[in-house]
Amino acid sequence: MSNQLCKPSMGQESDWSLLYESAFPLDERMPLADVQAMLASNTMLLHRTTNAAGELLCFSLVTPMSNFSLLAYIATDQTKRSSGVGSKHMKELLIVLKNTYQATHLGLFLEIESTKEPNLSATEATDRRRRLAFYQRLHCKRLCGKDYFLPSYGAGLAHRAGELLWFEYGNAVDKDATLAQVIAEIYTRGYGIAATHATYVQVMAQFTNSSATGQYDSACGVVATPAATPAMALPVTPVAAPSPSPSPSPSPFN
């Protein structure tokens, strides 16, 4: 019997919630009760990958937004690591989401910490490049030529340099007006910040020409792709629905 890839769940199992709370720092995750409430109301989607023994290998949480999907969290269990399970889960997740939302959604969007931020330690720089490489191998698109920031979840803390990535479900997502709408919703609904917030204003000021078309691809001026794949939990963006509620973000690779 082989792995059971990317199976939908209402969250009744305890394995994913235990991994969720161990994989992501407290300040980077939504309260578990909020996640469970969103699962119950079908405003967040949980998918689990398990091995032949039924043990959890990987899970993901996705929030359907107005006209796109948002990857909130993805992580693998490091104690039961299976070769390439993160990639296999992600590939199947993209198929599932595309089959469900292709007619109404642009694609699956996610955030990572910036690979271009200066003064990173060698370890942190390598981890971030590997994180990006994980998604590049799956043929993501990448916001090129514009600054992107991850608003802080802590009061008074500065935003962090980030990058916006996405997988298209059909037509190319390349219009600045389209990306501006997506980012505005991530910021206001995902992070719960107002349109007057300094981070919102700074990022959205780059999208003044609504008819502009950007050259968005995976490379954005080629970042080296390390051969090895890292340990599994990293940040993306959770969203509370239906009312705005800030929460951070993590993801995997393998």
Image (tube, helix red, strand yellow):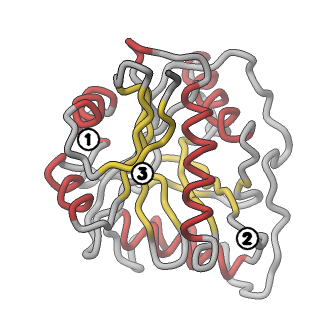
- For marks 1 and 3, the one nearer the N-term is 1
Q: Is residue 251 above or below residue 45?
A: above
**How far from the left and from the top, in percent, is residue 104?**
58, 79
Q: Are marks 2 and 3 in contact (CB under 8 Å)?
A: no
Horizontally, residue 144 falls left or right of residue 69, namely: right
Question: Identity of the amino acid at label 3?
Answer: Ala
Mark nearest the camera among 1 and 3 is: 3
Distance between mark 2 and mark 3 Cα atoms: 20 Å
Residue sitting at 76 percent across and 59 percent down? 145
**How far from the left and from the top, in percent, is residue 201?**
50, 74
Q: Are marks 1 and 2 in contact (CB under 8 Å)?
A: no
> Observer-nearest residue: 131 or 8?
8
**How far from the left and from the top, in percent, is residue 156?**
27, 54
Question: Identity of the amino acid at label 2?
Answer: Val
Q: Is the residue marked by circle 1 packed among few (<14), some (14-19), or many (20+) residues within 10 Å?
A: few
Residue hosting label 2: 173
Q: Is residue 155 above or below residue 5?
A: below
Q: Is residue 156 above or below residue 198?
A: above
Q: Are marks 1 and 3 in contact (CB under 8 Å)?
A: no
Question: Identity of the amino acid at label 1?
Answer: Asp
- Assign a secondary structure to mark 2: loop
Distance between mark 1 and mark 2 Cα atoms: 31 Å
Residue hosting label 3: 72
**How far from the left and from the top, in percent, is residue 84?**
61, 23
Residue sitting at 20 percent across and 53 percent down? 36
Residue hosting label 1: 27
Q: Quadrant of residue 217?
A: bottom right
